[in-house]
Image (cartoon, rainbow, N blue to C red):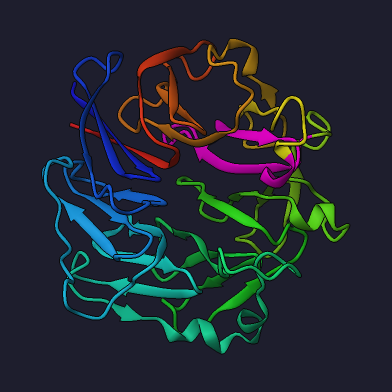
Amino acid sequence: MTSTLYLGTNKGVAVLRSEDGRQWELANQALQSWAVPMVAVHPDAPNRVYAGTRGDGVWTSEDFGATWKKPSYGHRGPGKCRCVAVDPSDANTVYAGTEPIDLFVSHDAAATWGRMDSIWNVPWVEEVDYPPGRPTNAIEPHVRDIAVDPSDPNTVFIGLQVGYMLKTTTGGASWQVLNRGLDADVHSITIDPSDPSRVWIATGGDYYRAGLAEGRALYRSQNGGRDWEPMAMEEFPDREYSVPIVVNPKNPRVLYSSLASGPPSSWAKNPDGPSALVIRSNDGGTSWEDLTPAVPIQTRQLAQAMAVNGADPDTVVLAFRGGRLCQSHDGGDSWEALDVEVGNVEDMKFGAA
């Protein structure tokens, strides 16, 4: 079975292809003028992929990344994208979150966009600061991630940097702030495909370090985001930063994440850098185990992105800062390095054909 990996990098989209799932080659690199923080793949057509560029909106490919176009060229739409997501129940519906904070939705596969101004009806949004208390011109407050409930397209979660989460159950007509028991620096949102009331998030631990959050980097909600509980507290007491959290779609009790010691701004001062770990849970996040000793790329860098192959969920790929990759074919028990390198990876998604 031919497999495709789409990687959003600091230099566009890298497309990797494999005929056997083990040997990979760089098939194409596109949109290299732009950083691509996130990609999204059509759930039923792996040849169709969306790339959110950090400056030129959402681009699409319908031929496994060989050629690209901007369907909304010349029309209103998202510009500086930080995330993009496809509605699992209607693949023509696409969401894009931007910097500064805005949310756009398209119902015709990114050809036209509507701006969801309703998020600004939440007073909290105007107060979001990034970095908190440390004004900078480099990065503005933004929408970091979007997750759509696979069983109810009217339910959407968005993560704000750094401003907790918003949730709608009305298709965007109204929103509520989710800020009970979690860190405000939400990086990734993952919904249990078998029970959408269960949600997992990976965070930057910013409010933990400020003494404002009980957990560190990983959290779980079992009531649709109303309440949150910390994860991986006892197993990894000195790791407080994370970006990815992904789930095995065929067995949602299996989760993968990567943890680092302190935020990126502290890594240069640490002799071991981020001193990062690759971890797995086999019980939905109740307990976690360290997979790092089996990972052949011992750089101690953070696995910035992770992807589980939906067609073969025992296959998991890690992308480390700097562009090195490795994969497992047994759910993380053993790993092998890939003989291919790309730019700094921000996001990664599988497409299988």
Q: Position of residue 180 (x, y in %)?
A: 75, 65
335 relative to 312, above or below: above
Q: Quadrant of residue 140?
A: bottom right
Instruction: Name the residue: 63% across, 18% down.
Output: 292
209 relative to 300, above or below: below
- Viewer-closest of 90 and 73: 73
> Horizontal placement of 23 versus 162: left or right?
left
Q: Quadrant of residue 179?
A: bottom right
Instruction: Name the residue: 27% across, 71% down.
Output: 106
Q: Quadrant of residue 18?
A: top left
> Horizontal placement of 120 versus 152: left or right?
right
- Viewer-closest of 343 and 83: 343
Q: Is residue 238 magenta?
A: no
> Horizontal placement of 177 versus 304: left or right?
right
168 relative to 54, above or below: below
Q: Position of residue 295 (x, y in %)?
A: 56, 15
Q: Which residues are magenta?
A: 239-266
- The furthest residue to the right: 211
Q: Is residue 252 magenta?
A: yes
Instruction: Name the residue: 49% across, 13% down.
Output: 335
